[in-house]
Structure formats: C-alpha cells, structure tokens
Image (cartoon, helix red, strand yellow):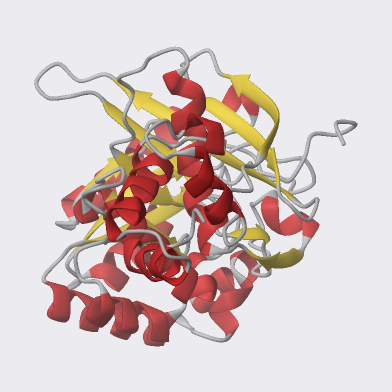
C-alpha cells in the first residue's frame, strides 16, 4: 500500500464498495502520518478497515538496528518482507536564517551491481531492485520513529544516494518521487530531492525529459577514462565523452546545474588531477562537490589530508570552476558516503 498512488487507492476503494473519500483518508494516514498499523487509522471504521485489509497490505519494515552518530546523524538497518536488508540515513542540519533541514539518504537497490572501488555497498554484490513501497517506506519509517520523540518532525529533503544505482531502478525511483512530493503526503518539494548516479548516460537524458525539477548529482571521481574505469566500472559502458555529452543535454533541457561529486584519496588529490578535471568541466553548467574518501575495509584507499583538499579546490577555483567540500556526516557509525552495507558483522 505504501507504493500506491491516490488514484490507485480510489480505484480499489470503489471496487470494494467504499466511498471515494476513504481513499483520501487512507492515503493521508499512510503517506502523511506514516502509520504502521491499521489500528492507527482512527477515522476509518473497523468494517471498512477489514474490507481494505482484504485488498491491501501495509508491510512495515522491521527496524533491526538504529545507530546515532556524535554529530546527530542516524543510520537505520531495516529488514524487508522477503528477509533482505538495507541501510538508510537521516542527517539533520540546523539553520539560523531558515528552517532546519532534515535529509534522508535512501537506498534504491538491495546491494549494487556497479561495484565502485571505494564503496562498501558494491562489495556485497547486487541482490534486487527495491519496489516503490520499499523506497518510500524508508522515508516513512524514519518519519514514524523520529515523531515518537518529536511529533512535529518533517523530512525536508531526500537524496537518492544510498545503496544501489538509482537510474538502474529508474521507473520505481520516479514513482517514489511522485509519492514523496504529493501534497496530501509528505509534500517534499521536487527541488528538494536529488538523484545521484555513477553515469548511466541514456537515463540522464531521459530524466531531464521525465522530471526536470528533481536535482541531479553525477559521481565523477576522475577526469580520465583509464582512471575512471578502475574506480567506476560503469565507465567502460558509458565513457566520459558520452557522459559529458549527456550532462550537456541534461542542462540544455532543464536549465539546471549538475553537481559533480569527486571523491579524493591521498593518491589522486594532486594538482595535475585537478587541472585535468577543470579541463573536462569547462563549458559544463555544474558545481564540483569534493569528498574525502571514507574508510571502507577492503578498499585499501587512504584519505587525503586537509592541505591536499585545499590545494585541489584552489586549482579548480583558479580555473573558474564552482567548487565546495562536502560536510562529512556520520563517519563514526559508517553512515557517510560509500559506507552503507546491508548488515553489521555478526548482526544477522
């Protein structure tokens, strides 16, 4: 039911003899109030709830574990109906001049088939795509549990940057975005949601046509094909020339800036690498977000020091490239970029 649109619920309600307004009530209970049981739907009578149960299932996720970082970030491990597991993250950002930002980093697949060299998720391989209900369910579960402590809690932003490659589960991700954006649901603005991709070039162009309002982040990480082939195997299928052409077409269609994510290691955080990146991005309507690679057992990659990060950014700035460094959140609980897995050792 968490994956049903309001129109689908209207059709189901009418099919079992219930009035149209029941569907709207049901949609709000599920998508706005994030309830986990039928009994919480107080304005729907028991007879109607029984009729709805015969056609619909809630299937809330099982919260296996919640971890809290020193910086307030929360990481959740959820078990799905078929026994598979996933991780997702809540990051809170306090603001002085605007409302606080509560960002959920959601997963779109169980595991990942891309196998990026610095990412923990890919080390476990790919199991399956997540359904619309499972994608939306991550935001709903987090909303439900945090509201036990803060009844006014509201997710403000969603980033599709967790486990998996979102553009390889394209249809389900776009349907999930529509549900999260619905005015009678959580009402999260389209421009407050961002899809991150390792570079599925045809889908980038399709996204521009299907939903030009949602944000796009491209995990670039290298400016030369021979290097990027080692870091991101997807580059062999969609090399940099094809990827950059897709990014150009995306910005021409949407008139929106792309965020280019660049993970730096002690090895590649060199001025000459920054110069190559600047040459690649000249003419692109984008912004570079530098990330210090996070510790992941088995990758053998070391983090750059602050001075290396600073020099790298300066080279880009001198070339006229917009650049910033991402604020690291949740690294002490393995909740930062590239650290999500399906379980903790010994947990399941």
Residue that appears at 20% across and 20% down: 95
Q: Residue furthest right?
A: 346
Residue that appears at 68% across and 65% down: 115
Is 260 displayed left or right of 52 in the figure? Answer: left
Residue that appears at 26% across and 54% down: 182
Image quadrant in which the C terminus is located: top right
Q: Viewer-proximal residue, 206 or 248?
A: 206
Give the vertical position of 83 relative to 93 (above or below). Answer: below
Q: Position of residue 284 (x, y in %)?
A: 20, 71
Is 348 displayed left or right of 297 in the figure? Answer: right
Q: Viewer-proximal residue, 95 or 27?
A: 27
Is 9 displayed left or right of 59 in the figure? Answer: left
Q: Position of residue 344 (x, y in %)?
A: 79, 34
Q: Viewer-proximal residue, 317 or 159?
A: 159
Give the vertical position of 338 relative to 113 (above or below). Answer: above
Q: Residue 264: in sight, yes or no?
A: no
């Amino acid at each position: 039911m968490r994956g049903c649109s309001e129109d689908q619920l209207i059709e189901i309600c009418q099919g079992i003899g219930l009035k149209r307004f029941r569907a709207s009530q049901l949609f709000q209970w599920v998508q706005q109030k994030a309830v986990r049981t039928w009994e919480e739907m107080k304005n729907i009578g028991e007879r109607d709830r029984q009729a709805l149960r015969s056609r619909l299932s809630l299937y809330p996720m099982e919260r296996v574990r919640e971890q809290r970082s020193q910086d307030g970030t929360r990481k959740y491990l959820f078990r799905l109906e078929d026994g598979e597991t996933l991780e997702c993250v809540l990051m809170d950002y306090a603001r002085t001049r605007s409302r606080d930002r509560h960002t959920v980093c959601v997963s779109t697949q169980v595991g990942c088939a891309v196998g990026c060299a610095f990412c923990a998720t890919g080390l476990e391989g790919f199991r399956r795509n997540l359904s619309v209900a499972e994608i939306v369910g991550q935001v709903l579960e987090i909303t439900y549990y945090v509201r036990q402590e803060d009844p006014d809690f509201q997710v403000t932003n969603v980033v599709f940057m967790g486990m998996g490659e979102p553009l390889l589960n394209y249809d389900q991700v776009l349907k999930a975005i529509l549900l999260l954006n619905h005015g009678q649901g959580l009402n999260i603005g389209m421009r407050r949601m961002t899809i991150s991709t390792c570079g599925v070039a045809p889908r980038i162009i399709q996204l521009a046509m299907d939903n030009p309002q949602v944000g796009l982040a491209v995990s670039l990480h290298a400016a030369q094909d021979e290097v990027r082939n080692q870091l991101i195997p997807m580059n062999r299928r969609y090399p940099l020339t094809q990827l950059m052409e897709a990014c150009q077409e995306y910005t021409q269609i949407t008139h929106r800036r792309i965020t280019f994510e660049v993970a730096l290691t002690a090895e590649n955080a060199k001025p000459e690498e920054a110069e190559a990146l600047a040459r690649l991005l000249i003419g692109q309507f984008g912004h570079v977000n530098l990330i210090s690679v996070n510790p992941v057992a088995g990758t053998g990659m070391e983090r750059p020091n602050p001075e290396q990060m600073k020099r790298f950014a300066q080279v880009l700035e001198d070339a006229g490239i917009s650049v910033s460094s991402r604020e690291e959140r949740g690294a002490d609980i393995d909740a930062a970029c590239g650290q999500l897995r399906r379980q903790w050792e010994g947990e399941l």
